[in-house]
Image: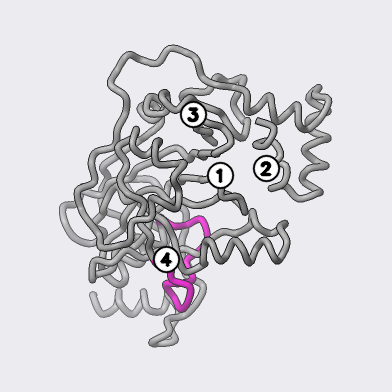
């Protein structure tokens, strides 16, 4: 626990630690450490419905990517309990149009690539180290593009904001361990964007979780509103016993089949509407290497040629 508290504090900037310390004292805690302990000590002990523990449907499609389970050994027990597949090592584009997808807009970026260039969107889980610590592995809802050739490619720029406060030497070590042109991904669902039936687009919402090697037998969740009492809401991490994790997923995973995406051009951006709801707006900041054209220009030309 003490090591975990130390890791959390070290991931904060000096200004953030000061602000969080002031907030902790306002809430009646004697220190920031005491406040963080109150957040992390919570472990759900309520009565779950006596049902079969949740498991994802087996993903039967195979890709020829390298399996990277050995890179993240601490998270494998959780994946097995949830019937999640292997962690695949996939390329992340870093140049040209498909290397400039907006940060944190992976679902939109992958759908836009599939619509413009062909291929499919693949939803699943991204896997990575949190900050500069190999002890903390974060597993998060993510989407990548399956190219027309059937290859998985990450077209979303990596968000390295959490690394801004570390030293240059530490950053270089992190880049050696996690190169910018590499991503780690567990596929769950393949979506046709332009072909197939009108109602065959599957949208999945899954909780983000963290596995820390310093906290054995526990999985830390960032947002589980159906499980956590209101008094605990708003806290950054909630610890759940490993054996209870599938039961949490049974409550928190939302899988919906919707109509295929509709695309609406707004200025130089493309809005994506799926089943009445709107994806966060994605897009690409760099032009195509082969043509020199920006994304919205290529989009317009394709729309005109299809008319």
Label 1: which secondary element: strand
Label 4: which secondary element: loop
Q: Which mark is residue 136?
A: 1
Residue closest to the eye, 228 or 267: 228
Q: In this rendering, is residue 151 above or below 58? A: below
Magenta span has 104?
Answer: yes
The residue tagged 4 is 155
Label 3 packing within 10 angstroms: few (<14), some (14-19), many (20+)? some
Measure the C-alpha gap from mark 4 to mark 1. Answer: 24 Å
The answer to which of marks 3 and 4 sits earlier in the sequence is 4
The answer to which of marks 4 and 1 sits earlier in the sequence is 1
Marks 4 and 1: which is nearer the front?
1
Label 2 packing within 10 angstroms: few (<14), some (14-19), many (20+)? some
Label 2: which secondary element: helix
Residue at horizontal 81%, vertical 35%? 21
Q: Which mark is residue 217?
A: 3
The residue tagged 2 is 7
Q: Which residues are magenta?
A: 91-107
Circles 1 and 2 in contact, beta carbons < 8 Å = yes
């Amino acid at each position: 626990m003490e090591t975990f508290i130390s890791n959390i504090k070290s991931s904060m900037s000096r200004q953030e630690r000061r602000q969080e310390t002031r907030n902790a004292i306002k809430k009646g805690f004697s220190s920031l450490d005491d406040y963080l302990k109150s957040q992390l000590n919570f472990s759900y002990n309520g009565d779950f419905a006596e049902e079969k523990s949740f498991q994802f449907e087996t993903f039967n499609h195979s890709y020829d990517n390298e399996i990277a389970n050995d890179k993240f050994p601490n998270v494998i027990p959780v994946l097995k309990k949830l019937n999640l597949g292997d962690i695949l090592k996939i390329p992340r584009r870093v140049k040209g149009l498909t290397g400039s997808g907006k940060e944190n807009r992976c679902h939109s970026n992958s759908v836009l690539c599939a619509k413009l260039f062909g291929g499919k969107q693949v939803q699943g889980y991204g896997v990575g180290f949190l900050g500069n610590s190999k002890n903390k592995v974060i597993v998060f809802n993510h989407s990548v593009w399956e190219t027309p050739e059937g290859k998985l490619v990450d077209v979303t720029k990596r968000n390295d904001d959490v690394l801004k406060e570390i030293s240059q030497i530490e950053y270089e070590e992190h880049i050696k361990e996690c190169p910018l042109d590499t991503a780690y991904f567990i596929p769950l669902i393949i979506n046709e964007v332009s072909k197939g039936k009108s109602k065959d687009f599957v949208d999945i919402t899954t909780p983000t979780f963290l596995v820390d090697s310093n906290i054995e037998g526990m999985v830390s969740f960032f947002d589980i509103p159906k499980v956590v009492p209101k008094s605990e809401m708003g806290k950054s991490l909630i610890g759940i016993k490993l054996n209870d994790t599938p039961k949490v997923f049974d409550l928190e995973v939302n899988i919906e089949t919707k109509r295929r995406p509709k695309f609406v051009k707004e200025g130089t951006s493309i809005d994506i509407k799926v089943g009445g709801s709107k994806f966060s707006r994605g897009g690409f900041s760099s032009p195509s290497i082969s043509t020199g054209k920006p994304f919205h220009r290529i989009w317009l030309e394709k729309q005109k040629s299809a008319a």
